[in-house]
Each structure stands twice: as structure tokens, then as C-alpha cells.
Amino acid sequence: MAAIPLNTIRSTIEGRLATELAIAPVLPVVFHNQPYVPTPNSSWVQCLVSFGANEYLTLGGTTGSSNSIIGIIAINIYTPKGVGPGANLTIGRRIRNLFNRQIVSGVGYIGPPIGPEVVTSPAPEGYFQTQLRMTFETFEDL
């Protein structure tokens, strides 16, 4: 089996989230390296997929060996400031349900989410922000 390209893994995760958030209630979703100017007093989501630790699963050089690749999905949830956390936590539950302990074709295993945790200094300012974080593990056969 060939290695799954990192871009395929990223786009699979992002596509899964974009498809869910295109269903009512619809929410804008923004990804790495995309410019976005939010509408004031609106709700929206940012998804950041990063690749991190790798480890050998089997040895064998450049062929006949396998690696484990661990990545992080960080999802920032933004809702209007000053109206309480209810809407934000509802969006957080929706996203947790989408990813929580799932095996996703083309990605691998997605671990249990952490959060939504309140971000005390939201960026951009003017929003109530929480963050969900999940690890994922995929395998690379050489």
C-alpha cells in the first residue's frame, strides 16, 4: 500500500467538517491560509490541521516498512460576545459528534476530543471563542 498524501488527509478532514457545517444551521468554515473577514455578531468556525509526531512501526528502509503519523485537528468556534456560551457549546457538541472516536477513510483513527475549552484572549477580538482539539493517527507504508 502506498503512503496517503498529506494533502489528501488534510482535505478529507476539512471536507468532512465543511459538509457538516453546510447543513442547517449553516456556519462558515475557514481553513489554514485562507483570508476571512467575519461578519460582526456572527458565528463561524476555523479548522486547523497539523501533522506532528511520527514513529517507526516496522524497520526495513525505504520499502517494506511502516510509519505512524500523528496529527492534530484544532477547531476554533466563534460566536457573538456578550450573549453567553450556549450557542458556542451547541456548535462544539455538533463538531464533537462528527469526529469523536471515528475511523475516517483516507485518514485513520480520530481520537476523543478535548474541549470545547474557552479561549481567554480570542483572536480575532470581539467574539466568544472556544477550541476543540483532537489527535488523529494515520499509517504510511513505504
Image (cartoon, rainbow, N blue to C red):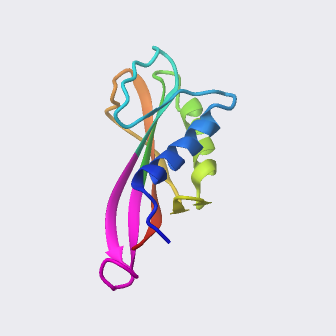
In this rendering, position of residue 64 left or right of residue 116? left
Is residue 59 one of those drawn in magenta?
Answer: yes
Characterize the magenta stretch by its predominant secondary structure: strand
Number of numbered discs on residues = 0
| Residue at (40% x, 55% y) in the render | 6
> Which residues, given as a range, are shown in magenta?
49-71
Judging depth in this view, the residue of 126 and 14 nearest the camera is: 14
Judging depth in this view, the residue of 54 and 59 nearest the camera is: 59
Residue 69 x %, y %: 39, 66
Q: Which quadrant would residue 25 be assigned to in this image? A: top right
| Residue at (32% x, 65% y) in the render | 53
Residue 138 x %, y %: 47, 65
Residue 122 x %, y %: 35, 31
Q: Residue furthest top?
A: 40
Residue 134 x %, y %: 46, 55
In this rendering, position of residue 8 left or right of residue 97? left
Compared with residue 104, is residue 77 higher up or lower down, i.e. above or below? Answer: above
Q: Is residue 41 visible?
A: yes
| Residue at (58% x, 61% y) in the render | 101
Is residue 78 one of those drawn in magenta?
Answer: no
In this rendering, position of residue 32 left or right of residue 97? left
